[in-house]
Image (spheres, rainbow, N blue to C red):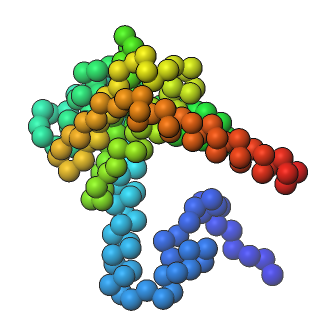
Amino acid sequence: MIFNRHDKLEGLHAFLSASNYHWINYSEEKVEETYSKWRAAQKGTKLHAFAADCIRLGQKLPRSKQTLNMYVNDAIGFKMTPEQILYYSPNCFGTADAIIFRNDFLRIHDLKTGETPAKMEQLMIYAALFCLEYGIKPSEIGMELRIYQNDEVLCHNATVEDIFPIMDRIVTFDKIINRMREQEG
């Protein structure tokens, strides 16, 4: 048999995919709810890309209390770098939405487009990754972490007591994973 070719679909996954088979047990309401969340996640990805482009281009948005506008305008005002990968090892890295380090002060901003309340732990992990990657002691710098969500800005002035334990866990857990990989062989 000669199978039909679907070259444009290679590497993509359908919402109703075989590999994500749980949907076969969904009710119609659950399909609607799950699909809405999936579409919201796709929209969030596009909004992040748009925001990063605005920041890179220095294109401010109209001044307002809208989440996206506040996030973009603040990042431009602080001359932040968007979508910066922070790397410790192949086991632990992440992408900060916007970051800058100047005059011994680390600033990390995170844009949240979903409804689920965000947690500051994600930004503290980014700060820990930054300190590990660049060899900076969290006790020697100031830090402000911001989450932009639901037309509000949550701020946290992170301290060494927040960041150092996370750095320690990253280093410890990385060693454990590497040891396990060596044993696998």
Describe residue 83's horizontal placement relative to residue 179 as left or right.
left
Give how far across and how far down residue 140 sits, in percent: 43, 16
Quadrant, the N terminus: bottom right
Find residue 94 and report its horizontal and vertical position in percent. 52, 40
Which residue corresponds to the image point at 37% horizontal and 29% vertical from the top-left? Answer: 159
How many callouts does the rendering have? 0
Farthest residue to the right: give it.
Answer: 185
Query: Where, by quadrant of the figure, is residue 134 drawn?
Result: top right
Task: Give me the residue at 56% from left, 27% from top.
Answer: 132
In the picture as drawn, the residue positioned furthest to the top comes out as 103
Most foreground residue, 149 or 18: 149
Q: Is residue 136 left or right of residue 48?
A: right
* Nearer the observer, 57 or 162: 162
**On screen, residue 46 above or below 84:** below
- Residue 172 figure quarter: top right
Is residue 25 visible in this depiction of the protein? yes
**Is residue 101 visible to the viewer in this orientation of the structure?**
no
Rendered location of residue 110, percent (x, y)? 34, 39
In the displayed structure image, the side of residue 22 where residue 96 appears, left or right: left
Q: Does residue 90 appear left or right of residue 66 in this picture?
A: right
133 versus 126 height, above or below: above
Q: Residue at x 48, y 71 (%)?
A: 15
Name the residue furthest front: 161
Depth check: give the residue in front, 127 or 15.
127
* Residue at 50% across, 28% down: 130
